[in-house]
Amino acid sequence: MICIERLEDLRRQVADWRRTGERILFVPTMGNLHEGHLKLVREAKGYRGRRVVSIFVNPMQFGAGEDLASYPRTLTADRALLEGLGNDLLFIPAEETIYPGGQAGHTEVRVPDLSEDLCGTYRPGHFTGVATVVCKLFNMVRPDVAFFGEKDFQQLMVIRRMVADLAMPVEIIGVATEREPSGLAMSSRNQYMNEAERRLAPRLYQELQALAEALGRGDDDYPALELMAKLRLDEAGFRPDYVSIRRAEDLCLPVRGEPHLVVLAAARLGKTRLIDNLRVERGGPGIATPAATF
């Protein structure tokens, strides 16, 4: 596996591959890789081309008081995992490469409306930081296809919208959430939880499943369903930010009988903020199933 830190070296290598007709397949990450990240790299293997993974802990997407300083950095272990998967190139840019003049006054990419809702309400500026760094990485790597996990469903939608609005020639592939045997969505932040919190954490996904079952029974009282789920999470020991039923294609509020839904939740457990979602396809009265990756 080629490891590159300098932008000039990255562009030279990508240009060499393109001259031989190779496509570029890209997985952007913040490192501390787990099976969820590795699933993205494996998914990319099913496409013809060269796989490029980036590791960059992006300061612009962390708010005041968030875990930028303590965010786990495990570059040696990450490199070994990627080498084991036969990844072609690892791009490890320095902060000066991404933000050569510093963050202050740097051009930002903002996806309006979608970025201010749900997690955007509780993490102001977060999705502007995400969109800005992904846009920059796309300009640096110039991928044909990029892969993102559906666990961060709102992030995936923000990136899809950015790519569409800015006419970027990148195909975005959403990859289904990788889960622990308990159902807990895999995340780098799961390691912040203590043993008792780890035992309780799967309850978040269980609540999403319960909502999907209620929707399958034909219950369209979305506000009541959301409120009851929040109350149950609160009683269990979570501090829920939101539980929300949305239209899957654009995260707008659904009308009654909407067939394509996604149930999203964010809740704090101890010092860890957990997010998860479950997409639901309603094929008819009394039928609701988890949706396939779209």
Image (spheres, rainbow, N blue to C red):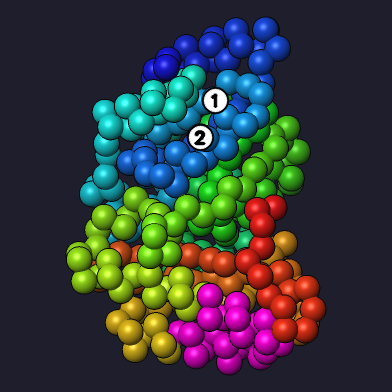
Q: Is residue 34 left or right of residue 86?
A: left
Residue in the foreground of this view, choosing between 283 and 204: 283
Q: Which of the 4 quarters of the picture holds residue 275?
A: bottom left
* Mark drawn on residue 102: none
Q: Which residues are magenta?
A: 209-230
Residue in the foreground of this view, choosing between 60 and 224: 224
Q: Going 61% across and 36% down the picture, which residue do you hit?
A: 146
Q: Which of the 4 quarters of the picture holds residue 278?
A: bottom right
Are circles 2 and 1 on residues that touch, CB within 8 Å?
yes
Assign a secondary structure to mark 2: helix
Please determine whether, in this image, residue 84 is positioned above or below residue 117: above
Please determine whether, in this image, residue 45 is positioned above or below residue 281: above
Q: CA distance from mark 2 to mark 1?
A: 7 Å
Mark 2, Cα crowd under 10 Å, few <14 / some 14-19 / many 20+, is many
Whether residue 227 appears in magenta in the rendering, the answer is yes
Q: Going 53% across and 75% down the picture, which residue do you hit?
A: 209
Whether residue 280 appears in magenta in the rendering, the answer is no
Tell me which secondary structure the magenta stretch mostly adopts.
helix
Assign a secondary structure to mark 1: strand
According to the picture, the residue beneath numbered tag 1 turns out to be 51
According to the picture, the residue beneath numbered tag 2 turns out to be 41
Q: Going 45% across and 31% down the picture, which residue do you hit?
A: 54
Q: Residue 63, can we see it?
A: yes
The spot of residue 286 in percent (x, y) is: 72, 84
Q: Which of the 4 quarters of the picture holds residue 279?
A: bottom right
